[in-house]
Structures are given as structure tokens and as C-alpha cells.
Amino acid sequence: MIRYVGGDFFAKKCKEKSETGIYHVMLRGINRQQIFEDDEDYKKMLQTIADYKDKCSYQIYAYCLMPNHIHLLIKEGKEDLGVAFKRIGASYVYWYNMKYERYGHLFQDRYKSEKVEDDKYLLTVLRYIHQNPIKAGIVEEAIKYKWSSYIEYISQKGILTDIDFG
């Protein structure tokens, strides 16, 4: 894809594929605006991720929904990650725009992703995702933040999260 920026043309870099199929994915609100206004919004995003998890056959190793962005540690399934995120984003934005009687984009650009190629980095990203609400000053302990997969690990009950890295 070619874009025009400030008088120059640039080719949009294709995302590099992970050999493991595992990525740390971030999706941010446009202009860093809030993408979750209330509990219903968080629940809707989790339900959307769960619905497409079945359809796209991806695995979720960790998640954290922050007020203005999302972190996912995800293993690509039968569909390309870009297709899965297009589905998730479009579905949530359609619902969100209807609920708040608004139009237009909700997310900034497309998702950002980092390849996770080894176990050490996987554990680093897992810890980073679960500590995000603490670093943002929202809670003092990860267990107190209800919009992350941390509780699923502590309880050993993976609901949305594939806690066994199967």
C-alpha cells in the first residue's frame, strides 16, 4: 500500500510474521480517547473477542482492556491477524457508535503488533500486560483490575484466556 505523507510517497510496511504465530497486539483509541465508557463497553469488547476467537481459531494468552487501549497476547489462528482484528474492530465500533450515537473512527490507525518468538519474551509480555493497570495508576494490585486476564491465571480458570499455552 502506498501513502502520501508531507509531499512524499511511502510504502506501508507489511507486518513481519512471527515464527511462533504469537504476537503482542495493541489497539489504541483515536487521539488516545477513551474506548470504554462503562462496564457494558468492556463486556461487549470481551464478548466480541470471544465470538471471533471461535470463528478465527486464535488463542488468547493474555489481555488487558484499558480505558483508551487494549493489549492482547494472541496466537494467530486459521485467519491472518489483520483479518481477525478487522472483524473485532469493525464489530465493536459499529456497536459503540450505535450506543453513543456517533459516527466515524474509534481506533487510531490499525493495530500495532510485536512478534513473540521465545518463551522468555512471552513471559515478559504476559507480565507487562498484567501490570499495565498498576503502571497507569488505576489499581495498586493486578488482582484488583477486573478487565484483564490476570484473575484467570490466579484462579486457574481460563475463560477467555488459554492459560495452558496449548
Image: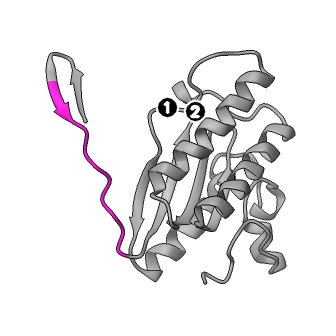
| Residue stretch rendered in magenta on the structure | 9-19
| Residue under pointer 2 | 29
What is the secondary structure assignment of the residue under circle 1? loop
What is the secondary structure assignment of the residue under circle 2? loop
Is the residue 101 above or below the residue 88 in the image? above
Residue 67 numbered mark, or none? none
Mark 2 vs 1: CB contact within 8 A = yes
Q: Main secondary structure of the magenta part?
A: loop
Residue in the image at 44% along x and 33% along y? 109
Extreme residue in the left direction: 8
Viewer-nearest residue: 18 or 140: 18
**Residue 16 covered by magenta stretch:** yes
User: Which image quarter holds the N terminus?
Assistant: top left
**Residue 25 covered by magenta stretch:** no
**Residue 120 appears at what percent x and percent y?**
45, 80
| Residue under pointer 1 | 108
Viewer-nearest residue: 14 or 141: 14
Whether residue 38 sits left or right of residue 75 in the image: it is: right
Mark 2 surroundings within 10 Å by alpha-carbon count, few (fewer than 14), some (14 through 19), many (20 or more): some
For the residue marked with disc 2, what is the amino acid?
Gly
Residue in the image at 43% along x and 70% along y? 21
Whether residue 56 sits left or right of residue 100 in the image: it is: left
Residue in the image at 77% along x and 74% along y? 158
Total numbered badges shown on the rendered structure:
2
**Residue 129 appears at what percent x and percent y?**
60, 60
User: Which image quarter holds the C terminus?
Assistant: bottom right
Is the residue 79 above or below the residue 9 in the image? below
Question: What is the C-alpha distance between the residues marked 2 and 1?
Answer: 5 Å
Whether residue 45 sits left or right of residue 146 in the image: it is: left
